[in-house]
Amino acid sequence: MIATVFAARAGAGGLGLQAATAAVGLSLAGREVVALGPGRAAGWPLTLAAPSLRWEDTPARAPSWFARQIVRRLRPGRLIWAHDRYIGAWAGARVADLRPNLVYAFTQVGLESLEWAKRHGVPTVLDNPNGHIRGFAEVYRAEWAKWVGGAYRGHPTEGMVRRVEREYELADRIRVSSDWAKRSMVARGVPADKVFVCPQPIDTDRFRPPAARPAPAGALRVVYVGSLDVRKGFAYLLRAVRQVGPGRVQMELVGGTGDRGSRRLLDRERSGLNVTLRPGDPVPAYHRAELFVLPSLEDGFGFVAAEALACGLPVVVTDQCGAAEWVRPGETGWVTPAGSTDALATALNEALARRDRLAEMGREARRAIDARDPMAAFRQLAEKVSSAPCGS
C-alpha cells in the first residue's frame, strides 16, 4: 500500500492538480493507494483513477479553530502554517494506523508521515511543487519589500521553512517537475542524487484550441492566469504593458489576490490600462487571447503555461519558471529574464510585430503538447516511485 499526503483539494488549482496526478499515477500502476488530504474536485485526472485508489478526507476543524483564524487574517502565513501542521498531524496518525509500505507526501504536510516512515524503515518520496523553500521565501520577502513595503506576514513563515527543510532531510527521494526546480534544490544543498525530475501530465481534452479564435484586430489580446501575488510577477507585466503603450495591449487577468497588499498593488498598477479582472474558468480566456504571459519569479512548473500551449497560444514565461523548458523560443513563445519589465515589454513588442504569425506559433505549441503523452508521465512517476530506496 502507498499512502499519499497532500494539502490542497485534489484536482483544483495547480497544487491540487499535482496532488491528483500523483495519486492517480500511482494507482494506475496497480498499487493500492490511500490518499489523505482535504478532499477532491470532479473531473480529470480523477476520472482515470484505478479502483485501487481510496480517498480519506481531512476532518473539518472545530468552529473555535476557525474563529481564532479570523483574528489572524492579517497574518496569512501563520494561518497556512497552522492549517498544514493540522493536516500533517492528522495524516501522520492515519499513516501509523495504515502502516503502508511506501509514503508519498507533499511538502508542508509530510513531516509527521516521514518521521513515522523513518522510524519503521519505510521508503518515502517527497513531492516538492516549487523550488527550494528557502529560495521561495526569499523571493516573496524581496518582492514584498519592493512593491508593498512593511513587514511580510505571508507564506512561508520561518517556521514553515524549517519544517520543509526537515522534510527534505527525512525523505529518501524528492520529486520535482522541472530541471529548474532540481537546480534550485541542489544549489541550496540538497544532494543531487536525491532529487528526480518527473514531468506533469496535461489534460489535452479540456485544454485545446477553440474551433475559431477572434481575428487579430485592435489591441493585442493578452491573458495571464494564476494567483495575483508578488511571487507571480504580475506587477512587472502591468508595467511592461504600460511601457508598450496602454492602447496597444488588452490585458485579461484570470485569478484573484490573496492579501490586501497584493490587492492594493494590483489596483495601483492597473490604473489607466485596458485590464479586465475575471476570476473563474480560464479556458474561455485562453480561447479569446492571442498570447499568454506568466511573469513568475519562482515556479517549479506552472501548469497554466502548459495549459495555454495546449489551447494553441504562444506563451511568454520567465527563466525562473519550470514550464520554460516546454517553450521553444521563437517557435512557440518567448523566455525572458525574471523580474525584468524591459524584457517583458520587448517580448510584447515582438509579438505585436509578428502578430500575423502568432496563430501559427499557437498551432505549433499545440503540436508540441500533443507530442507529450500524458500517460507516459503517469508511468514515469510510478516507475520512479517504485525504485525509491528503503528509508532505514
Image (cartoon, rainbow, N blue to C red):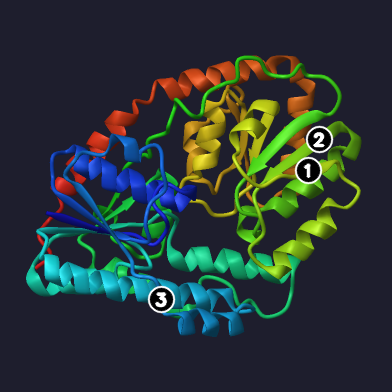
Quote the CA–CA distance across marks 3 and 2: 43 Å
Which amino acid is tagged 3? Arg
Looking at the image, which residue sits at the far front? 63
Residue 151, x across and y down, in percent: 67, 80
**In whole angstroms, how far apart are the C-alphas of marks 1 and 2?**
8 Å
Question: SS of the residue at dot 2?
Answer: strand
Front residue (pair 271, 34): 34
Please name the residue shown 83% across and 51% down the image. Answer: 270
In the drawing, what numbered circle is on residue 276? 1
Q: Position of residue 224 (x, y in %)?
A: 66, 42
Which quadrant, please, contains the C terminus? bottom left
Compared with 147, 158 (above or below) is: below
Horizontal relation, residue 68 to residue 256: left or right: left
Label disc, if present, on residue 250 of the rendered structure: 2
Q: Dot 3 surroundings within 10 Å: few (below 14), some, or many (20 or more)?
A: few
| Residue 150, picture quadrant | bottom right
Amino acid on which the number 2 mark rests in the picture: Gln
Assign the N terminus to one quadrant of the image. bottom left
Q: Position of residue 157 (x, y in %)?
A: 51, 77
> Measuring 25% from the left and 74% from the top, which residue is drawn there?
112
Residue sitting at 46 percent across and 22 percent down?
A: 368
**Residue wearing tag 3:** 61
- 314 shown above or below 82: above
Depth check, mark 1 against mark 2: the one in front is: 1
Q: Amino acid at mark 1?
A: Thr
Relative placement, left or right, of 138 versus 244 is left
